[in-house]
Image (cartoon, rainbow, N blue to C red):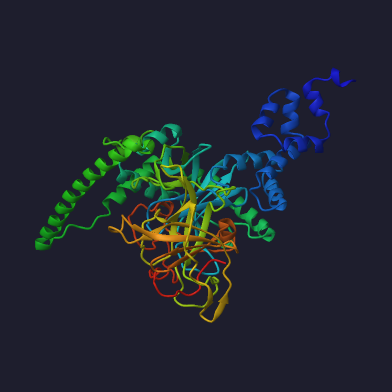
């Protein structure tokens, strides 16, 4: 039979499997799905045959999200041998993976969350504000597991006890989601719950989430509590697979974390009754007076908050859920027979200032930071880490006290005149007490203006010889004391590009140096140290204004706030 006698489907099916897999690697998943819808034979070939598995395996390799082929094959085995299921999960969870960073304004030291691959899952972890040390400390926030078809639908929140998990579900995840909302949903109207939950008053939302957490807790088997969450090597894969199977079983036994409405109402009622008994006599009068004053202060504060919120809403439709009329909690609960926790990834319109989005302080949400990829002419974009001081040192230096570790997000913008600026946004600060607000611009550099300054730290420092080779330098301004905490000023300085790949910003007046090195956050997390997290709701989004490290209480979690000085500082830089 000549090729002219064959239809298009027969021509494709006549290709060898390896050739079909090679061609499929250059197509998008939507193209393969469209091709499978062209005829029944193509559908069978691209969804059930051995050639189909090779085609979808090629798609998974094209994404390049997993560290090795062995990891990918282990994921496929966990998905009942279906590369299509693995590919579906990786593509569906793409808004959370691929180096995406999420943050919240509170606490001001930094609230930075990154999602990394687990085992047929993704694990969202928080980098803890800390000193420079050999291992990066982190705490888990949530895990998103693939179901039997590869859909990212099964969710677990993490809490303080490593053995405890809190089952939930992923209600939706838009392809270009830039906000993650922690919410509650009912069984009868899960979609409409996405619109009804934000209409609840803030206190009702908090009580509802806290009550759901108290009711849906499940416990890992004791032999899996210490199991790794991230694959540090191929040897971790069997233990990760066993842990995933146990989590799937727990999620099913807990009905996805759904709690009966009558039981939930009892829990909320008990939480409302947890108040101190009213004292008698003069003490009671003083207490009632304090409560009255607090009520008046709360009324004024809420009024101001509503005015500010409405003002912000005029500039950003991200806050369209704010309304002076709140939905009664009873109406929300009566919409179904059971209620559960849910995560929603939505694309909303956010206003930003120098790469930092405007954030609402009464929503349990994480906001996506824009991470620009390095490219010609914009080589320094991305996540960098370092400390103040020179000469550059190593994390295992024994100098005491250790210095605060800073994470900066470097991004490019054009000013009103079209000139290119490099902006370093603070996303993590390891001091005991915050010095500058979260999202501050630590320095702004004019990339079209060469610096006329000379790098000040050359020759011998502290008995060591450092040969500093400066490739180039740019003029700019660095952060300085201004008009209070919220309104820092700036002073002239220069950014020097060193030959070893480091960046060093030097304040002209004091000679203070901020040394930086590009980070691979995923690798740092894999080699890092897991520490206990907060309780599930504040662990997801800590909404209380704080200027200290609230995420850990172990020794050495933060460094001294003395990070800018006119004196020579010891060696402190990521290596």
Outermost residue on the bottom side: it is 463
Residue nearer the viewer, 135 or 568: 568
160 w.r.t. 55: above or below:
below
Query: Which residue is nearer to you in this view: 211 or 91?
Result: 91
Q: Residue most toward the top?
A: 5
Foreground of the two, 61 or 424: 424
> Where is residue 325 shown, x and y percent of the image?
27, 35
Visible residue check, residue 511: yes
443 left or right of 517 in image? left
Residue 153 rendering spot, x and y as whole percentages: 54, 41
Left or right for 156, reference 431? right
Q: Is residue 518 left or right of residue 241?
A: left
Q: Is residue 161 in view?
A: no
The count of marks equals 0
Q: Residue at x 57, y 49 (%)?
A: 374
Residue 473 location (% of width, % of height): 51, 59
């Amino acid at each position: 039979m000549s090729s002219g006698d064959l239809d298009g489907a027969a021509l494709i099916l006549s290709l060898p499997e390896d050739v079909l897999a090679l061609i499929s690697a250059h197509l998008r998943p939507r193209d393969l799905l469209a091709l499978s819808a062209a005829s029944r034979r193509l559908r069978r070939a691209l969804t059930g045959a051995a050639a189909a598995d090779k085609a979808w395996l090629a798609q998974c390799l094209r994404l390049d999200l997993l560290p090795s082929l062995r990891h990918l094959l282990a994921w496929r085995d966990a998905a009942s041998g279906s590369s299509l299921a693995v590919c579906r999960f990786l593509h569906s969870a793409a808004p959370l993976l691929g180096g995406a960073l999420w943050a919240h304004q509170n606490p001001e030291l930094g609230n930075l969350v990154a999602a990394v691959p687990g085992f047929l899952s993704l694990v969202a972890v928080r980098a803890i504000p800390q000193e420079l040390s050999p291992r990066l400390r982190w705490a888990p926030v949530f895990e998103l597991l693939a179901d039997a078809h590869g859909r990212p639908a099964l969710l677990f929140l993490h809490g303080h006890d490593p053995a405890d998990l809190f089952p939930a579900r992923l209600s939706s995840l838009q392809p270009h989601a830039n906000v993650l909302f922690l919410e509650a949903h009912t069984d009868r109207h899960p979609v409409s719950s996405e619109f009804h939950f934000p209409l609840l008053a803030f206190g009702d939302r908090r009580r509802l989430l806290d009550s759901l957490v108290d009711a849906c807790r499940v416990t890992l088997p004791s032999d899996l509590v210490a199991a790794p969450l991230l694959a540090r090597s191929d040897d971790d894969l069997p233990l990760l697979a066993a842990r995933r199977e146990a989590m799937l079983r727990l999620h099913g036994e807990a009905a996805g974390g759904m709690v009966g409405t009558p039981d939930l109402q009892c829990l909320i009622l008990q939480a409302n009754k947890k108040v101190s008994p009213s004292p008698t006599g003069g003490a009671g009068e003083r207490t009632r007076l304090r409560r009255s004053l607090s009520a008046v202060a709360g009324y004024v504060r809420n009024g101001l908050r509503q005015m500010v919120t409405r003002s912000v809403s005029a500039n950003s439709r991200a806050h369209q859920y704010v309304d002076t009329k709140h939905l009664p909690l009873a109406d929300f609960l009566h919409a179904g027979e059971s209620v559960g926790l849910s995560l929603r990834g939505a694309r909303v319109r956010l206003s930003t200032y120098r790469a930092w989005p405007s954030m609402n302080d009464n929503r349990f949400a994480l906001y996506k930071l824009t991470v620009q990829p390095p490219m010609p002419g914009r080589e320094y974009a991305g996540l960098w880490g370092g400390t103040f001081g020179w000469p550059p040192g190593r994390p295992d230096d024994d100098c005491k006290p250790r210095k605060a570790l800073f994470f900066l997000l470097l991004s490019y913008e054009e000013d009103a005149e079209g000139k290119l600026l490099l902006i370093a946004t603070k996303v993590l600060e390891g001091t005991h007490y915050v010095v500058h607000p979260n999202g501050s611009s630590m320095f702004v550099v004019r990339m079209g203006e060469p610096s006329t300054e000379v790098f000040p730290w050359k020759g011998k420092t502290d008995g060591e010889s450092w040969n500093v080779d400066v490739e180039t330098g740019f003029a700019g301004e660095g952060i300085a004391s201004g008009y209070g905490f919220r309104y820092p000023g700036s002073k002239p300085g220069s950014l020097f590009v060193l030959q070893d790949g480091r960046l060093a910003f030097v304040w002209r007046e004091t000679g203070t140096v901020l040394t930086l090195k590009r980070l691979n956050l995923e690798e740092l997390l894999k080699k890092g140290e897991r520490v206990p997290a907060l309780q599930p709701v504040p662990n997801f989004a800590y909404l209380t204004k704080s200027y200290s490290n609230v995420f850990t209480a172990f020794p050495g979690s933060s460094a001294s706030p003395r990070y800018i000085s006119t004196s020579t500082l010891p060696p402190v830089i990521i290596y």
